[in-house]
Image (cartoon, helix red, strand yellow):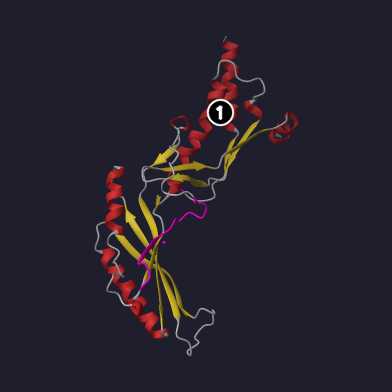
Amino acid sequence: MVQNSANKAAKLVGLAGTLVLFFSCGRASGPPSSVIAQSSRSDDSRGYAEAVVPNDPARQPFLIPPDLAVMTVSLSTTQSSFSASTQLLQEKADLLLTKVGEGDGCVARILDYRQPTQPAGKYFRWDGDQYTSQIDLALDIDFDGLSSVTNRIQRLNNCIQRIPQFVDKDTKKEEAILVVLSAAMPTIRDASVHRDELLQRRFAPLQSVVDAAQPPGLFKAEQTRCTSNGDVRIVERTLSGVELDVNFECVQLEEKETGTAEQ
């Protein structure tokens, strides 16, 4: 019995000693319709009516409450001149920035701008009468201090509703602005702060194998090598939680490889 305990302890020490971690980073969407909503996921083909598969509790996912949600708001317009297109677009973008910024936990910022072009794609052709320009803005919805999903939904809706309605039944065609909203993407500000805990969770099952009364015969702790580049990634994201995982790989070496590594 004493001998078995000593063997188990030796295996545990051997496995723990062979865990080598390589960290790649430090700790730490008359006039056209006004609003169109689109998904921010390139692989998202499901409709709103399709049921979302819930998280399986048996997986025991590592979930973190989202710190914020981000969206893209694109404004575009087509006008009869270069100057008219830029002037109207800038006016509406400034209005959006102001209105959204007045909301609690809502921030809008300019991401990108596409200067007026003609349908043929030629730049600065002054003899045409159709100049289309676009400006892209980011909408950040802060969830700090919001502990429930209901509160996050309310904050998200409040921020979106602050986007001005640029088109109504009285809007003239030459004043039309098309607004495209992406889907909201819940996220966290810094995934790397959870790296250590994630690595411990990935290593724990191996320790359980070593601690088993009858470990699998093919499992040899002293021949096991585990590595990680420290890359923390987001697996899934919802308003209830952001699931994280970390790169972690193990291989079992042949005895001769183990001997060479030890020398």
> In front here: 60 or 89?
89
Find residue 13 and report its image quarter.
Answer: top right
Please give the residue where the numbered disc 1 appears in the rendered image. 206
Q: Position of residue 226 (x, y in %)?
A: 60, 36
Residue 188 lies, in percent from the top left, at 40, 49
Q: Position of residue 121 (x, y in %)?
A: 54, 79
Residue at the limit of the structure toward the bottom, as seen here: 127
Determine whether 138 is above or below 209 in the image: below
* Residue 49 seen in render: yes
Q: Which residues are magenta?
A: 27-45
Three-letter residue code for mark 1: Leu
What SS does tag 1 mark? helix
Q: Is residue 137 magenta?
A: no
> Main SS of the magenta segment?
loop
Residue at image coords 32%, 73%: 92
Q: Is residue 43 left or right of residue 220?
A: left
Q: Is 248 in front, or is 160?
A: 160
- Residue at far top of view: 1
| Residue 132 sits in quarter | bottom left
Q: Is residue 94 left or right of residue 224?
A: left
Q: Position of residue 229 (x, y in %)?
A: 57, 45
Q: Is residue 34 magenta?
A: yes
Residue at 31%, 61% in the rendered image: 107
Task: Name the residue at the right extreme.
Answer: 256
Q: Which image quarter is the C terminus in?
A: top right
